[in-house]
Image (tube, rainbow, N blue to C red):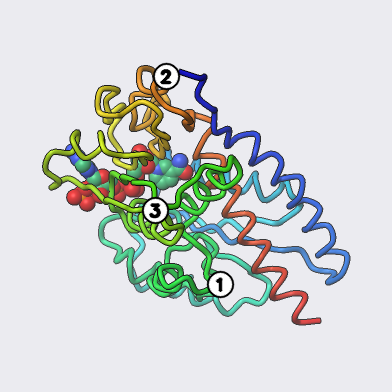
Amino acid sequence: MPEPILLDGKTLAKERQLKNRERVARLIESSGRVPVLATILVGDDPASATYVRMKGNACRRVGMESRKIELPSETTTEELLAVIDGLNADADVHGILLQHPVPPQIDERACFDRIRLDKDVDGVTTHGFGRMAMKEPAHGSATPAGIMTLLRHYGIELEGKHAVVIGRSPILGKPMSLMLLNANATVTTCHSRTRNLADIVRTADLVVGAVGRPRFVQADWVRPGVVLVDAGYNPGPVGDIDLENAAVKSSAYTPVPGGVGPMTISTLITQTIDTAEAALLNAG
Ligand code: NAP
């Protein structure tokens, strides 16, 4: 078996960062204004705080500004909606990121859906999801959109291939399945009620692990030559696929860390710049 290809998200994200820095510099020069991503963090979950910090740092690395909004864990849905309304109306803000998950008393879907479509740079709104599904212009959910960019970059063929996505969350598994379908893969979406999961995975040309359970997908579930995309990020860090044993059987795989994670942030930044360009250049 030939050596598997490492789908190196870290390096690709670095390359995109250079291009994005140039785009931001050009935008500032022509409009006199700096693109701004507003990030909203509700509560004090340390992992969420880390993700928001990483996204703020990524903004700074390309010359963008990040406006950090931190709200207490007892924030109500109405209070959060009011904050989102304010950011929607603020012409200085080009993208809005509401860090998921929010505390349980908050109606997360209502808050996601309040984000104005053109500022939905993380691709979380129902409207944006529907447009993406219909192949209309929209920002895709950042993690699956980043995965698609990575697969395209490495020339991974999807047409007619059987893609098995394990997980159906609104921000990851479900949009992933639709993006693969739109790329002409034949897609099976699996979840916690799926029967004979291992047998289904054995028929896959490409497997996306998006389960949230460390090393959940076993090496003996995958067939030789499979493409493995591990979207999982669990303490360790380890992914949702037992890459230690499964990667050698694959033709290509995303490492953890350094695969899907950097592509998620890179996609968020790229989509914010897209929005800022549309807003600032059209404004003249
Ligand atoms: P989630 O909302 O908890 O969804 C997990 C999905 O896995 C659900 O659809 C669930 O099925 C399914 N599932 C759970 N147990 C299963 C089982 N035994 N068999 C088959 N399916 C099962 O998680 P998420 O937000 O999508 O995240 C998934 C993973 O991706 C996590 O490891 C997370 O850390 C990682 N992640 C990484 C990034 C990144 O940038 N790298 C971004 C987001 C998430 P049901 O729908 O039936 O409950």
**Relative to 205, is 246 above or below?**
above
- Quadrant for ligand 1 reads top left
What kind of residue is marked 2? Val
Q: Give residue 231's position: percent from left, percent from top.
A: 41, 40
Side of 97 relative to 26 (left or right): left
Query: Residue 195, relative to residue 40: is it above or below?
Result: above
Badge 2 density bin: few <14, some 14–19, many ≥20, Cα 10 Å: some
Binning the other alpha carbons within 10 Å of mark 3 as few (below 14), some (14 to 19) or many (20 upward) gives: many
Q: Quadrant of the N terminus?
A: top left
| Image marks 1 and 3: residues in contact by CB distance under 8 Å | no
Return the x and y of residue 47 as percentages of the image width and height.
42, 39
Q: Earlier in the sequence, mark 2 or mark 1?
A: 1
Residue that carries the numbered disc 2 in the rendered image: 248
Position of residue 211 measured from the top left corner of the image (x, y, whole percent): 29, 41
Picture coordinates of residue 6, whole percent (x, y): 54, 28
Q: Residue at x 66, y 77 (%)?
A: 91
- Pointer 3 residue: 185
Residue at label 1?
87
Query: Which of the two labelled residues, at mark 1 and mark 3, occupies the earlier sequence position?
Result: 1
- Three-letter amino acid code at the position of disc 1: Leu
Q: Quadrant of residue 103?
A: bottom left
> 129 or 206: which is nearer to us?
206
What's the residue type where badge 3 is placed?
Ala
Give the mark, 2 or 3, whose residue is nearer the N terminus: 3
For the residues bearing labels 2 and 1, Cβ distance under 8 angstroms: no
Q: Secondary structure at mark 3?
A: loop
Marks 2 and 3: which is nearer the front?
A: 3
Measuring 52% from the left and 35% from the top, which residue is drawn there? 259
